[in-house]
Amino acid sequence: MSVGSEAVSGEEKIEINKELLLKYRVHLGRNIKTRFSEKFIYAIHPRGFYLIDLTKTLERLKVAAKFLSMYEPEEILVFSGREYAARALEMMSKLTGFKYMHGRFLPGTLTNYILDTHQEISFLLVIDHTYDQQAVDEAVKARIPIVSFVDTNSDGAFVDLAIPANNKGKFSIAALLWVLTVLILREKGILKEDEVIDVPIEEFMVQPENV
């Protein structure tokens, strides 16, 4: 698998912008908002759910990429218990070298050094800090910084860097981790500023037969 590419197919060039995130429904929030999430919301849909400001999503994705690129790949763990995140986490790990886990987060993974499953890390990235609470709780105890995507119903508890986004849909999760992967590889100099990986976003999605 090669890394750099200027196009997905033919002459179609991909740009990381609001239009790309819009296409993959990253802006679609819940019908609940919190005080924490208010600053990330720009409107309410006629159906009653809130819409996330993708300008702020892009800003936070770039900040996250800068931070994560400063660490050695093996110091970073990406995790989610969400079914739709499985393929995206695997692909991100292959391209960045990050550790990844999916499914049940075994108690003691970050806090119990005598376990065979113990992970020694410097940074934790989760898809949803509320859904992935066990991992977040252990990172807090171990004083490990946490990056998480936060939806409009999120309270942001214990998250050091919150990225506003739809963190529940399979299209959105795939696009978010694809974009973050590209931005990290650009920060590391593996990709040029106008390059993207030669893997389409759809390859980051869980396919129906795997669900």
Image: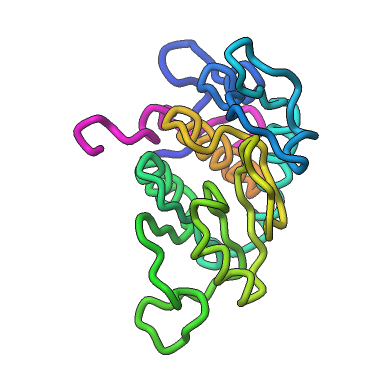
In this view, the residue farthest toward the right is 39
User: Which quarter of the rendering shows the N terminus?
Assistant: top left
> x%, y% of residue 154?
64, 44
In the rendered view, tell whether residue 201 sits above or below residue 147.
Answer: above
Front in this rendered view, residue 30 or 194: 30
Query: Residue 113, position in %: x, y?
Result: 47, 86
* Left or right for 110, reference 69: left
Residue 83 lies in the magenta-colored region: no
Q: Residue furthest bottom?
A: 114
Question: Residue 204: percent from the left, percent from the top?
Answer: 39, 35
| Position of residue 79 measured from the top left corner of the image (x, y, whole percent) | 46, 56
Write down the region rendered in magenta: 191-211
Q: Is residue 81 above or below residue 30?
A: below
Q: Is residue 102 left or right of residue 139?
A: left
Q: Quadrant of residue 69?
A: bottom right
Q: Depth check: give the residue in front, 143 or 153.
A: 153
Give the residue at x 65% y 35%: 152
Residue pictured at 55% horizontal, 52% vertical? 130
Q: Residue at x 36, y 61 (%)?
A: 104
Vertical order, 95 against 52 (above or below): below
**Magenta span contains residue 207:** yes
In the rendered image, the quadrant that contains the C terminus is top left
Q: Is residue 172 above or below residue 139?
A: above
Residue 21 in which image quadrant:
top right
With 162 as the anchor, is 196 left or right in this view?
A: left
Residue plotted at (58% across, 40% down): 180
